[in-house]
Amino acid sequence: MRNGLSRGTRFRSLLFLFPSLLGTLIFFVIPFGMIIYYALVSKPVGGEFVGFSNFIRLFHNRAFLVGFRNTAVLCVSAVTLSVMLALGLSVLLENALPARGALRTAFLCPMFVPAASVVLVWTVLFHHNGAINAALAAIGLDPVDWFHTWWGSLMVLLMYLWRNLGLYVLLFTSALSAVPEELIGMANLDGAGPVRRFFTVKLPYLAPTMVFVVMLSLIYSMKIFREVYLLTGSYPYDHLYLLQHFMNNTFMSMDYPKLCAAALVLLTVMGAITAAVFWLEDRVGRDLENG
Amino acid sequence: MTERVRKNLCLALAALAVAAGLAGCGGKKEEIPEVSGNVRVVTAGELGAAGIVDSVYTGNGYLVLVNANATGTLRQLITLDRDLNVTERSDPQMSSYAFVTTSDGTGRLISDKEAGYTEKAKLGRAANAFSDGEGLYVYSNEGLFRNGEAVALPEERGYAYSARGMLTVGGTLYAVLSRAQTRDGAETWKSTWLCPVEPGTAALEAEGLSVPFRVDACASDGVTGWLLSDGDLYRTDGESVTAYGRLSTKADTRAARLRAGNGDLLLYTADRLTLLTERDLGGAPNPTDAPMEKTVIHIAASSGYYDKAIADFNNSNEDYTAVIDTRYSHADLAALNLAVANGEVDLVIGEYGAMYGYAKKGLLASLEETAPELFEDGVLFPNVTEALKVDGTVYFLPDGVELDTFMLPEKDAREFTGLEDFLDMVEETYPANYNEEFFHFLQVCGDNWIDLEKGEAYFDDPSFRRVFKYFGDLPNDYELDAGVPHPLYLFNPSALDSGYVPVAVPNEKSYGVIVKSNHYFGVIKGGAERGASEFLKYMLLDKLELKGGYPVSKALFEEYLASATAFSGEPAYSDSQKEVIYEYMALADHVNRVDYAIYNDVIYTEFMAYDNGDATLDEALEHIQSRVSLYLSELG
């Protein structure tokens, strides 16, 4: 007998695990292996092994580089602004604001609006002859071409924040309410002001939630492609062209080796970011435990 | 056997049972044999019509109601014999016809007493009528009516009930009642019943024989009831429903009409009549019979219906049976891509962009190797096959091509040296009104501004600026609505007799006559062994079921030009027009390879922005250049 389990128990355990292992193998391991394989051959059918040339081709592809740049800029700004704004708003909501409950609900509402409706509203707002430009004209400013200039990135960022901020605020608010009252009381006795109390007592306790929000906002910032696609189609202007445009269009043109190479690059980058975030959380958690 | 072993064995068996259950839940459709052996098909084009409205079996032959012109207002009644040959036609007139079928499956024109002009006009478009000798039933999505009185259908919140047809089997009259879930304006089929109908029935209940599929159309000859669902035929005796056979062409049958009589079945869908005779139906294999001995050629099509050609091929070929078993819309190209990449099909029919992609990805077989007969001297137009080469090899061919050129009044037609020369003429002769359309201009001249080989766009070229500005400054939609004249013409061979002549505008790459088709045929690698190239050769050399343009086969081209007739019965082309077509067919040497999606997605939006005053000319051109460049970069 090893590991305290009899052979029969291990056999039964494996038997029960078998369906889920089979599912993992079929739906995750094998497709992943196929992605690696396709990324290393010249074409899907009867292709030859070409080493890393698909990756080299990818890094020389202007569309990929533009998409990667725009996606990276959007992700970094979305994550940073999401965390900062959501944290700030949850701290505000923690205080006795009037109509606090209604505000929380209002923040969450955009999440329940269908993407197509959001896009429709955004089109009306940001069209060349839309409400925003009308407002700009009313105060004597020139209209902005939202869909064909870098202002488009700002428009997408605004849409992302409007849509998702409520959830992050909710997460931070519940995390803030979980900070032990005794610690805050002790900090008060030590004469710590509100700012000091926030940074030295509350913030370390928010670290796990912050990691969660960072991961969530990273994932949601990648998903904003749906709205951008509905707004601008398959081939938008440079500043609105995201990595998912590239992936989508490459899939349609059946360039699977290039598509798989791009997927592996994206996976590597996302994996590295995730590892870095968890490493950071681990460090902060250890500091917290050590006082 | 110890208790432990028995327990483990039981667990293993349980797991196997679960796995088998899961495998069984895959939703595999019931295997139904093809009904493809002896069907006969006649198309609207063959009847000299613009479209088929309705048809009915009369006992001796068939009555077919057709649209004699494209607007659908000029109708004609055609009589066909049992072999679908035309025996009589009425004079085209603004008249209202409608058919009624009876319990033995035969049909006739509804008399003026039975239905007035308005009812008949409506019947011809949307509904069907059935007579049981005592009452006239009219059924459509709007409901079921008997002698003008509505028969109430069940009402249920969130669901829509409709009568899909009527049957008489074994002396009992049935209404086919369908129940669909309605959500977001769309209907999803949920249930179907064969509901018995008594002469005094004032309301239908959702009861009777339950039919486990959506019924598109139905018919009966008094003895057997036939149900059609998504290309599959089912038989019913009122007690049960059994699968009978699958139509090989996999046409969309949701708007189909089915007639039965004297053992025959007449199906109308996609502007063609398909006839399954008593012999065919009697001879069709039952699901339990041995499988067909012929090798099946599996075809995926994203464009074009070839029911007639497929039926004729299947009738004449002893070794192969062609079946269109995968059909995709243009919007569902990704699914077609997967079917082709997975080797589910032997032959693919699609548009240029898709076929080019398949060739580049190594999915298609070289036609020079798999169908060398096509490339022998004098068989096809060599300039056309040359224009369609991808990396020096012909991977796909159309059955017919359109010749894309500019149309000009004869007085302005001359030999142009190039695009600038042509634009000079346009701006000078037609400063405010030119009979061309911007997007057609782009299609004919697209290769002046996009080089797919180099992956470069030249929309900042002065010639494009001239074209863009010229068309952008013509009356826009609002002005057209206000009555400003701006006739738009596209190149169309039937327009040849209107005083216009086709004119080629040469560029650096080509003579200026573009080879164009929406129906290219490509053999998937390995498909030739399963007869795909046999079918391809048949389509290109033996059979003429053109979707427009001229045959690529030289022999069929000659035959087509000699025999093409207008609806009036006069020859379609004059001798001088034939000369021009001959000349251009021999000189066409270029394919416009640019994906039309780019035109729609990029250039259209920017053109409209400029046209509506939302962007300046420079901005619009810059946006086009930028967006198209991105597209070209993606391809690199």
Image (cartoon, rainbow, N blue to C red):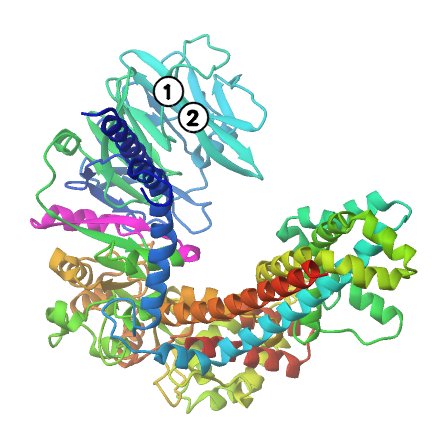
Query: Which chain is disc 2 placed on?
Result: B
Q: Which residue is mark 2?
A: B191
Residue B128, position as x, y percentages in the image? 41, 28
The number of discs equals 2
Q: Please state the extent of the stretch shown in magenta in the rendering.
A: B305-333
Q: Look at the numbered discs 1 and 2 and tell me whether their residues touch, using CB distance below 8 Å.
A: yes
Q: Front-most of A287 and B152?
A: A287
In the picture, measured across the screen, residue A100 lies left or right of residue B468, that is: right
Quarter of the picture holding the C terminus of chain B: bottom left
Callout 1: SS: strand
Q: Is residue B60 above or below residue A250?
A: above
Q: Front-most of B457 and A224?
A: A224
Residue B250, position as x, y percentages in the image? 29, 44
Tell me if residue B306 is in the magenta stretch: yes
Specify the quadrant of the image occupied by residue B175: top left
Question: Residue placed at 10% from the left, 49% from the top?
Answer: B316
Q: Front-most of A120 and B438?
A: A120
Name the amino acid type tagged 1: Ser
Residue B262, position as x, y percentages in the image? 20, 25
Name the amino acid type tagged 2: Ser
Q: Which residue is mark 1?
A: B210
Q: Is residue A49 above or below residue B460?
A: above
Specify the quadrant of the image occupied by residue A156: bottom right
Q: Which mark is residue A38?
A: none
Are labels 1 and 2 on one chain?
Answer: yes
Bin the neighbour count of mark 2 within 10 Å (Cα to Cα): few under 14, some 14-19, many 20 and up.
Answer: some
Q: Is residue B488 visible?
A: no
In the picture, measured across the screen, residue A104 lies left or right of residue B165, that is: right
Callout 2: SS: strand
In the picture, measured across the screen, residue B368 lies left or right of residue B432, that is: left
Q: Front-most of B516 and B615?
A: B615
